[in-house]
Every structure is written in structure tokens, then in C-alpha cells.
Image (spheres, grey):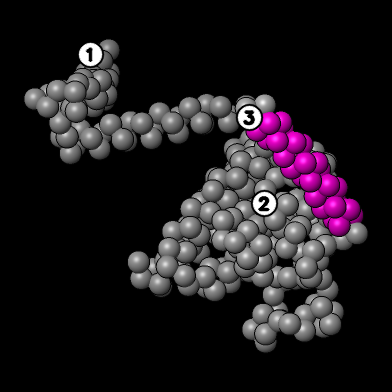
Amino acid sequence: MNRAVSRLAYRVILRLHPASFRDEFGSEMQWIFEQERQPGAAAHLFLDGTLSLLRQRFKSQNSHGQLSIASGVIITGPGIAPVRFFQAALTLSLLCFGLMLLKLPNPLNASVTWADRMPCYTVTLQAPSHAEVVLQSAP
Amino acid sequence: MLAKNAKNPPLSSATLHILLALAGGNLHGYGIIKEVVRNSDGHYRLGPGTLYDNLKKLINAGLVADVPTSSSSTRKAASAKEEDRRFFSLTREGKDVLSREVDRLQGVVTKARARLQEARTGRA
């Protein structure tokens, strides 16, 4: 990978760390990244940086009882569980939707695509038009 | 709770290696990483994320301290470009904790050797 690109990617990982940790150690971590020039060091640093990001975010979440999202939006208290559920559902949905768009064959049965296996998306996509029909028929 | 864990053996591998590296003198973060690689003959490699996460715990526990910027004697080995880095030192309490951990490990090794010896003589 190009050095400039990897440097930028590492900077992004550092930027996503909680502000308190980033302000205290961010410049030192960036400096160490610049010093490490051994072959294979970049992959090790990226893995370490990603694990550190997850660790610091988890700690930050636990210590303050709130979920701080990278964009700066803070959701507190009992809203965390529904938000996590929603995030997991959204990620899974996007993954399935991506597979549908790609029309990848089902590994268990090559003749059946993922689109054939997931009729729920047809229902979801048709829901707005159904709602429209209901509204029109109400009066 | 984290501070309490950092003080009480058994220490984690990262904590043990960091304390061991700092026992040789004051070092900045990259210096600690290099020292850990050297002490472990290249078998253990700390990343900066793991290093600073552990250093933060150790500082909070009072086992490691920041070296003041003006303390030039402790930084004489550092090159010009390393001078503005953040240096760390082992506190007295840090030395005590490291010493206790080394004693504990020595006890484990002694017992392990005795067990292995018994197993060998039992087989013979």
C-alpha cells in the first residue's frame, strides 16, 4: 500500500478514538507509525489500531454509560439497547441486500440465488405502495 | 478496578513487558516497543494502541510516571528528533510490583521444574 494512503488511513483510525485518549496519545501513536518501516509493520499497526479503537470506544461507553458515535452524536441511557439492535439489523439488512444486488448464488444450492431465498425484501419494498393504497381507500 | 489489577500479580504479558522495559531506564513509547522486542527475542511485539492503553492504566495506578520535559539527564541518549517525545519512568511502586511478579514467576518455574523432575524419575 502507498505510504501516504496508509498514513492517512492510520490517521483516520486515530481520529475515531475517543477525544481524551486521542489528545493524550494520538500524536505519539502517529509518530510511532512513522518510525515503523519494517516490512509487514503496517498491517500489524492497523490491526493494533483497530483493536485499540474498539477497546477505547467500549471503555468510553462503559465509563460514561453512554454510546458516543464517531460523528459526535451522543445517545444516552435506555436508548442504547434499541440502537444496538437497530444497528445490527441494519448491518444485516444491508449485507443481505448487497448479496441480492450481486445475485450471488446460494452456496447450498447453486441454482437458487439469495434473491429467491429472501422474499421479505419484496414485502419491504412494496410496503410504501401498500400504505398509499390504504390512504386512498380510507375516505 | 483497573488500577488495582495493574498492581496485583499476576500481571498481563503487556504490563510485565512494559515494566521490564522501563526497569532499564526512562524511555519514550517507541523506545519501549523496541526494548520489549529485544527483551523477548522478537517473540512479543507491542503495538502503539496496546502500549498506550496499558501505560494509561499504569500511570493511573502510580506504577509509571511521566518524565518532565526539563529533565535533560534522563534524555541524554535520545536523538534530537526524539527529544520532544513523551518519556516514561518506573516509579518506586512500579519497581516493587515488578519485583513481586518476578518472584512469583520464579516460584512457578521452580515448581514446574520440580514437577517435571518428578515425572521423569517416575517414568524411569
| 10 Å crowding of disc 1: few (<14), some (14-19), many (20+) | few
Q: Quadrant of the C terminus of chain A?
A: top left
| Span of residues in magenta | B93-121
Residue B124's label in the rendered image is 3
Q: Are marks 3 and 1 on the same chain?
A: no
**Which residue bears the numbered disc 2?**
B14
Q: Are marks 2 and 1 on the same chain?
A: no
Q: Amino acid at mark 3?
A: Ala
Q: CA distance from mark 2 to mark 1?
A: 68 Å
Q: Quadrant of residue B94?
A: bottom right
Please say whether residue B105 is visible from this viewpoint: yes
| 10 Å crowding of disc 2: few (<14), some (14-19), many (20+) | some
**Which residue bears the numbered disc 1?**
A137
**Numbered-mark total:** 3
Q: Amino acid at mark 2?
A: Ala
Give SS at disc 2. helix
Give SS at disc 1. helix
Q: Position of residue A32 (x, y in %)?
A: 58, 69
Query: Which residue occupies 63% across, 58% down?
Result: B40
Give the farthest residue toward the front.
B124
Q: Quadrant of the N terminus of chain A?
A: bottom left
Q: Considering only vertical position in the picture, is A131 above or below B33?
A: above
Give the farthest residue toward the bottom.
B80
Q: Considering only vertical position in the picture, is B71 above or below A74?
A: below
Instruction: Tell which tag, 2 or 1, sits nearer the viewer.
Output: 2
Query: Which residue occupies 65% across, 33% down?
Result: B120
Whether the magenta-drawn stretch holds residue A71 is answered as: no
